[in-house]
Image: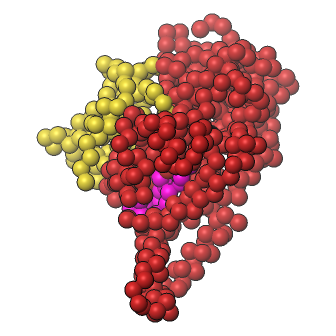
Amino acid sequence: MTVKVEDKLFLDRFRVDEEPHLVLKDARVCVADCEEQPCLYICPAGVYKLENGRISVGYEGCLECGSCRIGCPHFNIEWRFPKGGYGVRHKFG
Amino acid sequence: MRESFDVAIVGGGPAGISAACVLAEKGVRTIVFERGEYAGAKNMFGGVLYGHDLARIIPDFAERKCPVERNIVESRIWYLSREAGFNLAYRDQAFFDQLRNNVFTVGRAKFDRWFADQARARGALVVCSTVVTDLMKDDAGKVCGVVADRPQGELKARVVILADGINSPLAGKTGFRPEPRPEHVALAVKELIDLPEETINARFQVEADHGVTTEILGETTRGMNGVAFLYTNRSSISLGIGANLAALSQRRVRPYELLEEFKKHPMVAPLIQDGKPREYLAHWLAEGGYDTMPHLCGDGYVIAGDSAMMFNALHREGSNLAMASGQMAAMAVYDALNKGDVTRKGLEGYRDLLKDSYVLKDLKKYRRFPSFLDSHDELFSTLPRLKCMAAREMLTVNGVTKKEKQGRIWKKIRKEMSLKSLFRLVWDGWRSVR
């Protein structure tokens, strides 16, 4: 089953910071050393995508769960919360 | 920030706000840092809140317009195969008439905001849109304040209460708690689905303001240790599913695909038909239980709620443990401040209070439960399938004798599960909850 996560993220409100709060520490590790690439699957917002052989990080739709940080087998994601007041904003919760 | 405070609290969720209410009421100068634009902006849970611990902090919460969605009068447990399932339900009108505030549904964006306002009314300062990025330490290594992501963001406090939730980059940075491993958390995704109030009343066969909760186990998590849920709000349904993060990773399952599959199950689909999706959220559950909890205090700080991995998976209790622990943290901090000893030793009273309460006693009782679920995949695969097969066989009237049917069922079960593994399942299960 293919599910478009974009349709789900469309329901949420985000205040996007220009500066990303998710950064790959060393993008080469993802390509050269990471066979599993679990970030492509576990992220509930589909932040990580494989594009032209590289991992792209669409931090704008991040739901701030932290799964990629602890799920990355190489701990290759520099992960911090968006600046105060930025990021996802729940209406109902 | 030049002002100084007695207590700085990181996180404006149930644990942090509970602590703030108690401390502010006692006249302790208290500040809460919340990273969301308002308390609750970042928070998510399944949707069920218990009133007991809230009432200990705010006895008249119902009169103070606590944003309750529905009082829960019926609790259901479903055990599902891919296309069928069992339903065990308990309904009791007493949960509306006499025990009305025992359990109810809330939306955290509304509830936490309301709760933070109660702390403000008691004199606590709640600062939103502010992330605590580090802890200040004195020369002896004692925590003596927080660093926030704003100009002149250093703020001194005699004690810091860490109530920043399960996903805590601050814990990773300062080491007050180890970073959880993927096998110690479940990743849950939830969708809020709008439906007219009357439609919900009709579909769940309840009167106005009455609600139903449903916890779901079985093949819905595709053989992974996990759980799904479906809760009624006033004019929406909270529906979600979560599975062990290590299992999701290993099996390359996208959480939102699990959610969509769940929504299509024949027992779920009619309940949410024509509903309008309104919000999509994701959060961790502290699945590791008692054995993954950190030491609850140190020099100048205590840890409360999800931040301390307090979660009772069997009884879906988390936010109430957060409130209880926040309240006890506040009481212990108050004592330590009065005695003038805010070292780890001076703050140990927090641990003693928790130990004597249902919080640590329950968590300890069920300490084996997480590993029981983790080591018995068949609970989420073979077992629900076989049970549904047996029910279908017995309920099909086709001229075959009941004795022969029983023989067929038993044969099928034995083909997939040995007597030994069946015995082990029952034995391990009993041991994990006794």
Residue B86 visible at all: yes
User: What is chain B's hue in the picture?
Assistant: red
Instruction: Say whether residue B90 is left or right of residue A56.
Output: right
**Which quadrant holds the N terminus of chain A?**
bottom left
Residue B128: where, in percent of width, then height?
Answer: 54, 17
Asked where in the image residue B65 lies, by quadrant, the reply is top right
Which residue is nearer to you in this view: A62 or B158?
A: A62
Which residue is nearer to you in this view: B68 or B321?
A: B68
Residue B138: where, in percent of width, then height?
Answer: 66, 22
Instruction: Say whether residue B265 is left or right of residue A26.
Output: right
Residue range of the region highlighted in magenta in the rendering: B213-228
Instruction: Work out whether B96 lies above or below B425.
Output: above
User: What is chain A's hue in the picture?
Assistant: yellow
Residue B324 visible at all: no
Q: Residue furthest top?
A: B2
Residue B423: where, in percent of width, then height?
Answer: 58, 80
Say whether residue B430 is magenta. Answer: no
Which residue is nearer to you in this view: B268 or B300?
A: B268
Residue B30: where, in percent of width, then height?
Answer: 70, 18
Instruction: Say whether residue B181 is left or right of residue B124.
Output: left
Please report the residue visible at 66 percent of the width from the left and 69 percent of the height from the top.
B431
Q: Residue furthest left?
A: A52
Please report the residue visible at 38 percent of the width from the left and 62 percent of the height from the top.
B222
Please report the residue visible at 53 percent of the width from the left and 36 percent of the height from the top.
B234
Instruction: Say whether residue B352 is left or right of residue B160.
Output: right
